[in-house]
Image (cartoon, rainbow, N blue to C red):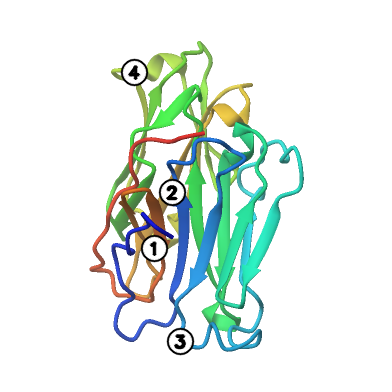
Amino acid sequence: HAGWGPPLCAPAQGAAVDLTLLANLRLTDPHRFFLTCVSGEAGAGQGADAWGPPLLLEKDDRIVRTLPPGQPLHLARNGSHQVTLRGFSKPSDLVGVFSCVGGAGARRTRVVYVHNSPGAHLLPDKVTHTVNRGDTAVLSARVHKEKQTDVIWKSNGSYFYTLDWQEAREGRFLLQLPDVQPRSSGIYSATYLEASPLGSAFFRLIVRGEEQRTEVLGSRGVLWVARIPHVPRATPFFSMPEWWHL
């Protein structure tokens, strides 16, 4: 498509998986917004069986539970190598976690896109954090609309930690995660107690280990790109743009 620059990162040499998730962030109208997942595998366009199970692209409510879309989302396929998700009807349809899944067996791989609401009570200073095993990860939720209630942190949808509302420092709630391990990877959220999940700050934490599949994120022009090759830990990382559109 015109105006869509190339991905910022190419798959590593000898990569086992090449999966890319794209979102056009300049489409502010939910009716026009869409996500596309593309397989760059050599055999991905050679028939339905080239990848085994077909590519999946869906809103993942197992971790971040929000209201269902106003109408069923529409999934369109272009052969076995590309799938596009459309049919959003309201801004809240976009908030949460979307995932693309491709490959079969041990090569089954998931790419995740996290979408925050610009009107949320809390906003992430940085959406995606990539750190090495043993490092300390610090997640920062900036207060956008203050509530005088505790802040609940969750990890992959499960309760993780609570901060008193008076523990905010310079308008931010910080969660420090020392000595992180690959099992610490996942989706984290910060939400005011009894507030709607749509008002949460959502984060993606990736902890690289010697055998860990590493997600490389980038932004260029109108594109948000996520690609997962099977790579060593010294992988370059590009941060998610610090703005969101609904």
Give me the C-alpha separation between circle 4 and circle 3.
Answer: 49 Å
Q: Which residue is mark 4?
A: 171
The residue under the point 42% across, 82% down is 16
Helix, strand or loop at disc 1? loop
- Percent of width and height locating residue 44: 53, 83
Count residues near mark 4 (Cα–Cα under 10 Å), then give few for <14, some for 14-19, many for 20+. some
Give yes or no for contact between labels 2 and 1 (Cβ–Cβ under 8 Å).
yes
Q: Which residue is mark 2?
A: 204
- Between circles 3 and 2, the one closer to the viewer is 3
**Is 55 in front, or is 143?**
55
Compared across the picture, whether 37 is left or right of 66 comes to left
Helix, strand or loop at disc 3? loop
Q: Which residue is mark 1?
A: 215
Q: Which residue is mark 3?
A: 42
Which mark sits nearer the N-terminus, 3 or 2?
3
Residue type at mark 4: give it. Gly
Give me the C-alpha separation between circle 1 and circle 4.
Answer: 30 Å
